[in-house]
Amino acid sequence: MIRFAAVVCLLLLAPGSTTHAAAVVGKPAPGIELRDSNGDTVRLDSFRGKFVVLEWVNFQCPFVGKHYGSRNMQGLQDKYTEKGVVWLSICSSAPGKQGHVEGPEVKGLLEERGASPTHFLLDPKGVVGKAYGAKTTPHMFVIDPKGKVLYNGAIDDRPTTKPADIAGAKPWFAAALDAAMAGRAVKPAATQPYGCSVKY
């Protein structure tokens, strides 16, 4: 069943499968103003001066399960938030669609997985997801301290649901953030994200 779901998800990622706009590398990041799982309003511009990571998430997606079940995603969250990076997990699944969550249930989901984003943001109308052109879960973005998009794309180069593939993968997202934080050019700065389609 998981293999079938993965195939369906990948089929939904064919080029041209989305008409949404996209956050463009080198351009100002689209604004964000969303409620987090605690009911507090979170604005992207309040984090100026810091690197910000955006991670689109759907805990029912097997590709997300790959990175959370292996604790890869949690490890990245811990590594970078300890360095002062703001990590925003965003759920753009619409009510009634796969992966949709309400604020009160998020705490349990995060505790169960040992996840520690700075904020878990709820985007049930898909406004922010569409503004960024978020296509998949996961889909990763890096925003620099001046508010510009530095990276847009996949977490790595292995578009599978197998946790064993993480070890040999090129960690595109992490490499991009490491380069940016060290003052080096980000290469590649844009890659093709993989995973389940965002359930707008």
Image (tube, rainbow, N blue to C red):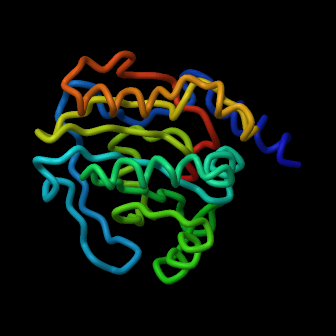
Which residue is at a point 72% across and 41% down the rendered structure image?
A: 163
| Residue 187: image location, x then y, percent | 35, 16
Q: Nearer the viewer, residue 111 or 136?
A: 111
Instruction: Count the marks.
Output: 0
Q: Residue furthest bottom?
A: 104
Please state if 133 lies on the left or on the right of 180 as rendered: right
Q: Is 57 above or below relative to 19?
A: below
Q: Residue furthest right?
A: 1
- Residue 63 position by quadrant: top right
Which residue is at a point 40% across and 49% down the rendered structure image?
A: 79
| Residue 46: image location, x then y, percent | 13, 59
Please state if 148 lies on the left or on the right of 114 as rendered: left
Which residue is at a point 37% across and 38% down the rendered structure image?
A: 141
Q: Is 79 above or below relative to 14?
A: below
Which residue is at a point 61% across and 62% down the rendered structure image?
A: 99
Q: Is 47 above or below relative to 191?
A: below
| Residue 39: image location, x then y, percent | 33, 80
- Residue 98 position by quadrant: bottom right
- Residue 60 position by quadrant: bottom right
